[in-house]
Amino acid sequence: MEEEVKNQMQTRSEEYGKHYSEENFWFKLGRIAGKAGIKVTYAALVLFYVLKDPGTPRKERNKILGALGYLILPLDLIPDWIPVAGFTDDLAALTWAIYMIAKCITPSVKAQAAAKCREWFGDFDPAIVEDYFKF
């Protein structure tokens, strides 16, 4: 049963990954960051910077592409326009990917994501989100 779930997640990740492009990522994240909040934004940025790292293995890249592709996808399980709940499915996909690729998250990646969050949100303390993601 566990292997079946793993295979389903891999298949979905590949499907969602087809929706990813760097241009679409920045466009979507720039539009939703304020509404989605710091957790979603930081998680997406962490995954983006891990993806950009040339040392990230292909298997991990595919998981990241799936999660970021899901974020970009206009049709979600829970539509983004629904107050409070709208980004919970996106956060779940991003959190899953972070859990799966945690060994690839370097201090440099976290620093880049934190710097971008400071740029967008002002005074940003990474401890707020790192407790959630358990890096």
Image (cartoon, helix red, strand yellow):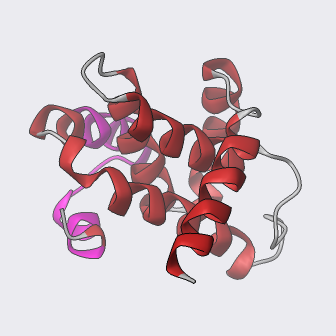
The one nearer the camera, 4 or 116, is 4
Q: In this view, does 57 lie to the left or right of 55?
A: right
Res 104 → quadrant? top left
In the displayed orientation, state which residue is furthest to the left: 107
Front residue of this view, candidates 109 and 85: 109
Foreground: 79 or 104?
104
x, y percent for residue 133: 29, 68
x%, y% of residue 35?
64, 60
Residue 72 seen in this snapshot: no
| Residue pictured at 14% horizontal, 32% vertical | 108
Magenta extent: 112-132
Residue name at image x 36 percent, y 57 percent: 100
Q: Residue at x 66, y 71 (%)?
A: 89
Magenta part mainly helix, strand or loop? helix
Q: For this rendering, which residue is in front, 119 or 44?
A: 44
Magenta stretch containing residue 113, yes or no? Answer: yes
Q: In this view, does 30 lie to the left or right of 3?
A: right
- Residue 128, quarter of the rendered image: bottom left
Q: In this view, does 105 lie above or below 55?
A: below
Q: Number of numbered discs present?
A: 0
Observer able to see residue 41: yes
Position of residue 106 measured from the top left corner of the image (x, y, whole percent): 15, 39
Q: How far across and down, in percent of the image, does residue 107 sit? A: 10, 40
Instruction: Please say whether residue 67 is one of the residues in the magenta stretch.
Output: no
Please state, as top left, top right, bottom left or bottom right, where the N terminus lies in the image: bottom right
Asked if residue 54 lies left or right of residue 41, the reply is left
Quadrant where the image shows the C terminus:
bottom left
